[in-house]
Image (cartoon, rainbow, N blue to C red):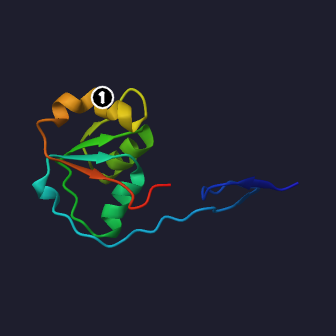
Amino acid sequence: MKIYLLNETPFKGVENLILNEIIFYDFSVDLSLYDALICTSKNALKALQHAKITLNFKLNLYAVGQSTAQYAKNLGFKKIKIPSKAYGKDLFLEFKEELKTQKCLYLRAKNIV
């Protein structure tokens, strides 16, 4: 009997089935105009890399979850915050007072399904 995994992470003895695809578009943004990045997925950071945007590791980075935070840390970001619960609403509620005083860039998908 075959075992199928519905993602691209390889495992021995498992066949991966890819049901969706992420397409990164070319875009430009000057990160020096912002104090903080808000990322709900590590794909937001991958999009910056794909578009060859110069990353500013001095920015405050607000990540919804641990996986995104770890990806940001691996890239070189130092000032990373995550909410106690991994939901966008919780990120907003937990950090809204400090976000009020910062110019923020929220990175998200063009189409959300």
Crowd tier of the residue under label 1, counting other residues whose Cα lies within 10 Å: few below 14, some 14–19, many 20 or above = few
Which image quarter: residue 49?
bottom left
Residue that appears at 37% across and 34% down: 89
Residue 71 at what x, y percent from top left? 39, 49
Q: Is residue 89 above or below residue 23?
A: above
Residue extending furthest bottom? 26
**Of the pair 69 and 106, the residue shown nearer to us:** 106
In this rendering, does residue 91 appear at all? yes
Residue 17 at what x, y percent from top left? 68, 61
Residue that appears at 18% across and 55% down: 56
Q: Is residue 75 above or below residue 17?
A: above
Asked whether, in this view, residue 89 is left or right of residue 19, the answer is: left
Residue 79 at what x, y percent from top left? 23, 39
**Of the pair 92 and 59, the residue shown nearer to us:** 92
**Disc 1 target residue:** 93
In this rendering, does residue 82 appear at all? no
Residue that appears at 38% across and 60% down: 46
Which image quarter: residue 88?
top left
Residue 58 at what x, y percent from top left? 16, 47
Query: Amino acid type of disc 1?
Result: Leu
Residue that appears at 25% across and 30% down: 95
Asked whether, in this view, residue 4 is left or right of residue 86, the answer is: right
Quadrant containing the N terminus in the rendered view:
bottom right
Asked whether, in this view, residue 5 is left or right of residue 37, the answer is: right
Q: Is residue 104 above or below residue 19?
A: above
Q: For the image shown, how many numbered marks are present on the structure?
A: 1
